[in-house]
Amino acid sequence: MKPAPFEYHRPGTSAEAADLLHRLGDDVKVIAGGQSLLPIMNMRLAEPAHLVDVSALPELRRTVTTAEGATYGAATTHMMFEHELVPDVTNGLLSHAAAGIGYRTIRNRGTVGGSLAHSDSSAEWPTVMSALGATVHAVSVRGERRIPVPEFLLGFFSTALDADELISAVTVPRVAAGTRWGMYKMARKPGEFAESLAVVQLRDTEGDGPAAAVWLGAARDVPVRLERVEEAIANAPASGLSPADLTDPLAADIAADTTTASPHAGHALQLHAVTVHRALAGAERAPHAA
């Protein structure tokens, strides 16, 4: 199938793009890489009257680094992260995550802003950016506002963006010295969306062993922080735990997930437990951030 007729707009600046969104009303979509939007339009699941193409806006490809972290333009592609064409302030996590997204043609065109705007918790960037404490920059004719990623992602295909706003950038804090990370994605085959996706960060603390931060994607409609799992693994190395040891706290953490009430709840929980366990083991083996 082909998309329904639409009017195509290609602004020269983000300010022009914001003005178009303001003037065109609700029946408009922003497009950059188009790796999620175009298939939906081809299936006639979305029929916007207007497309605003921001892929060529220079300010949306700009990266600014500071001692605190980096701000990446929303049109930065997955490929640019994968091959470190932009600075990676996360000790390699951004590059690793990007390399697992889709296939090369998708990574060449798909963008970090587009992935977050699409808001699918089975994708890499929503979970990774939540785990990193990243912040979305949203712009409109009213100015800019900054929204922490966990507050930005409201549910499947639902975000805190107003109808006349677009994502201009994402700010990622620099990973603190002494932090190790692990990420594990469970999928049917390479390039597919995740069935389970875990990101673990271990930060050394004085006397009490490493402090853990654990996030899980593809279990609920938004990524979820596994606080009970963090408590369960405190002072317990992965080598001393099995995935079964994580099942009960994991079930409590994702209790809002409708999947856990299905006939396949046991399988889903086991899958997530194995994913978290492997991400934790990866973090324990990883080198510390300098």
Image (cartoon, rainbow, N blue to C red):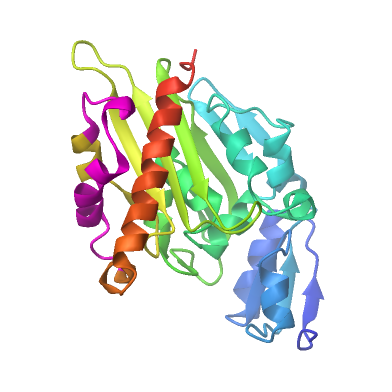
Above or below: residue 213 compared with residue 266: above
Is residue 200 one of those drawn in magenta?
no
Read off the magenta span.
233-257
| Residue in view at x 19 percent, y 37 percent | 232
Please state if 16 lies on the left or on the right of 117 as rendered.
Answer: right
Q: Is residue 282 visible?
A: yes
Task: Give the image location of residue 200, x and y in percent.
Answer: 39, 35
Q: Nearer the viewer, residue 198 or 23?
A: 198
Quadrant of residue 233 in the image?
top left
Please state if 112 lies on the left or on the right of 197 as rendered.
Answer: right
Task: Give the image location of residue 143, x and y in percent.
Answer: 53, 55
Please state if 28 lies on the left or on the right of 244 as rendered.
Answer: right
Task: Give the image location of residue 83, x and y in percent.
Answer: 73, 33
Q: Nearer the viewer, residue 169 or 116?
A: 116
Above or below: residue 84 compared with residue 9: above
Q: Is residue 145 visible?
A: no
**Magenta span main SS:** helix
| Residue in view at x 48 percent, y 64 percent | 161
Q: Quadrant of the N terminus?
A: bottom right
Is residue 237 one of those drawn in magenta?
yes
Task: Give the image location of residue 15, x and y in percent.
Answer: 67, 57
Above or below: residue 144 compared with residue 83: below
Q: Nearer the viewer, residue 254 or 32?
A: 254
